[in-house]
Image (tube, rainbow, N blue to C red):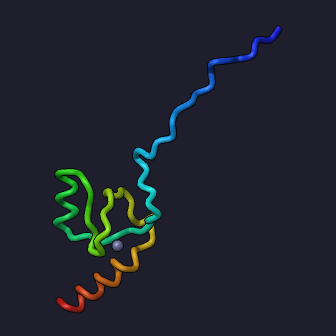
Amino acid sequence: MTTPVSGSVETRPQTAEGDTGDGDDYAHYARKEEITRAAIEGGRITAICGWQFEPVRDPSRFPVCPRCKELKDLAQQLL
Ligand SMILES: [Zn+2]
């Protein structure tokens, strides 16, 4: 006689918590002060293109944001 296993089904609401999926999979450039501040205080970094993001441990996994690249190139020309 087999007893069907009941009560083992876990139902949990789908929450978007911790999900940064805004459709942005780019590595952004940010000013050094921004990165330092975020490392100390936590919170988000504002990239030079204006995008706000959580600090990423390994940004090299992502392609570089084209806008950030463009702005960085421009900034270097100005220096
Ligand atoms: Zn960017």
In which quadrant will I find the N terminus?
top right
Instruction: Relative to 20, say whether 23 is above or below.
Output: below
- Split into quadrants, the picture shows ligand 1 in the one at bottom left
Residue sitting farthest toward the bottom: 77
User: Which is nearer the eye, 22 or 61?
Assistant: 22
Residue plotted at (70% across, 17% down): 5
Q: Residue furthest top?
A: 1
In this rendering, the answer to whether 30 lies above or below 74 is above
Name the residue at 62% across, 21% down: 8
- In which quadrant of the rendered view does residue 73 lie? bottom left
**21 versus 70 height, above or below:** above
Rendering quarter of residue 32: bottom left
The residue shown at (51%, 36%) is 13
| Quadrant of the image occupied by residue 70 | bottom left
Residue 52 position within the rendered picture, expressed as x and y whole percent measured from the top left: 30, 63
| The C terminus, quarter of image | bottom left
Front position in the image: 71 or 59 = 71
Seen in the image, is 64 located left or right of residue 40? right
Percent coordinates x, y for residue 60 in the rendering:
41, 66
